[in-house]
Amino acid sequence: MARLVSPLLPLLKQHQSWVVLSGAGVSARSGIPTYRDSTGKWLRTEPIQHQAFLSSDSQRRRYWGRSMVGWPGVRDARPNAVHRALAALERLGLVDTVITQNVDRLHQRAGSQQVIDLHGRLDRVCCLDCGVGYDREDIQQRLQRLNPQHRDFTLCARPDGDADLDDTQVASVKLVDCSACGGLLMPDVVFFGGIVPRARVEACQRAVANADALLVLGSSLQVYSGYRWCKQAKQLGKPLYIANEGITRADHLADVKIDEDALSLFLTAAEAINALMTGDSPCPAQ
């Protein structure tokens, strides 16, 4: 293990200000499945697309029916050792910002303060007509009251609070409308094919520009909204380090790429840095 961790430990010690880009591989350790395998291919059918949600009532039934079954898996997930290690590095002043592609808010629950939710947050729902916001759990209770036929389902978890329902089950789903205006409700996330809000993009640009280095954790970077920060880092002459088990879209840009046991090696290095700077013994990895 010491031999394998050596690429990361000196890097964490070398730079004083990090931006970390986290992906689905980080949340996978909390039991939330990933979209892709180690080669970047879809593990399941592709998720719902932004325009399909907006334009199709059947697609909205599909989304909300599956989300009603899958949401508790995200709601009840707990931060894992990677989330906690990043929060500890932030408290030490080493991690300036976490840009996360995940929508589960596990970084914040672990104690990280400077987090940019690149693709939004699944625990909120917004009305597309009047802009009123709702807590996702409140919507869950309304969905369950309207759809008692699905209330006790326990299906295989899928990424981002999704779950499998067949066409007959989807067809019976009754939708929840905005209580204020009767408008269309949508989770406060950027679906595939959607656009990341400009203010969020600019916040990420500033974070990467102000940091000494960019570290990618647990992301294949197949989606451009994450890959673009790797491109920016290299354009600015910033070092790019990638710790991901499997290929990524930015492997050719990386100054260092760690593949095998990537997140475990990050944890070991982070714990060593924490012990060095605080005098504490390393935290348990689980």
Image: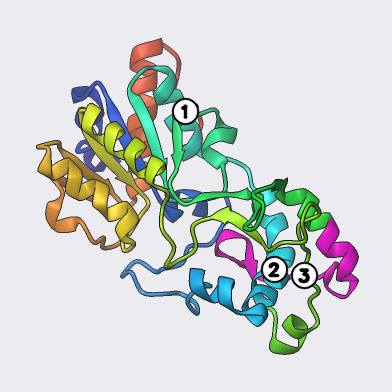
Pinpoint residue 8: horizontal percent, then vertical percent. 24, 36
Label 1 crowd (10 A; few <14 / some 14-19 / many >=20): many
Secondary structure under tag 1 reads helix
How far apart are the two marked residues, 2 and 1, measured between alpha carbons? 32 Å
176 is within the stretch colored magenta? no
Label 3 crowd (10 A; few <14 / some 14-19 / many >=20): some
- Please give the range of residues in magenta: 142-163
Using the image, tell me which numbered label, if any, was put on residue 7.
none
Residue at position x 18%, y 24% in the image = 14
Please identify the quadrant where the N terminus is shown.
Answer: top left
Secondary structure under tag 3 reads loop
Residue labelled with disc 2 = 64
Residue labelled with disc 3 = 175
Q: Is disc 3 in contact with disc 2, using a CB cutoff of under 8 Å?
A: yes
145 is within the stretch colored magenta? yes
How far apart are the two marked residues, 3 and 2, measured between alpha carbons? 7 Å
Pinpoint residue 130: horizontal percent, then vertical percent. 67, 52
- Amino acid carrying label 3: it is Leu
Secondary structure under tag 2 reads helix
Question: Which label lies toward us, 2 or 1?
Answer: 2
**Residue 246 as seen in the image, left or right of residue 234:** right
**Is residue 218 among the parts visible in the rendering?**
yes
Q: Is disc 3 in contact with disc 1, using a CB cutoff of under 8 Å?
A: no
The one of 140 and 134 positioned closer to us in this rendering: 134
* Label whose residue precedes the other's in the sequence (3 or 2): 2
Using the image, tell me which numbered label, if any, was put on residue 87.
1
* Label whose residue precedes the other's in the sequence (3 or 1): 1
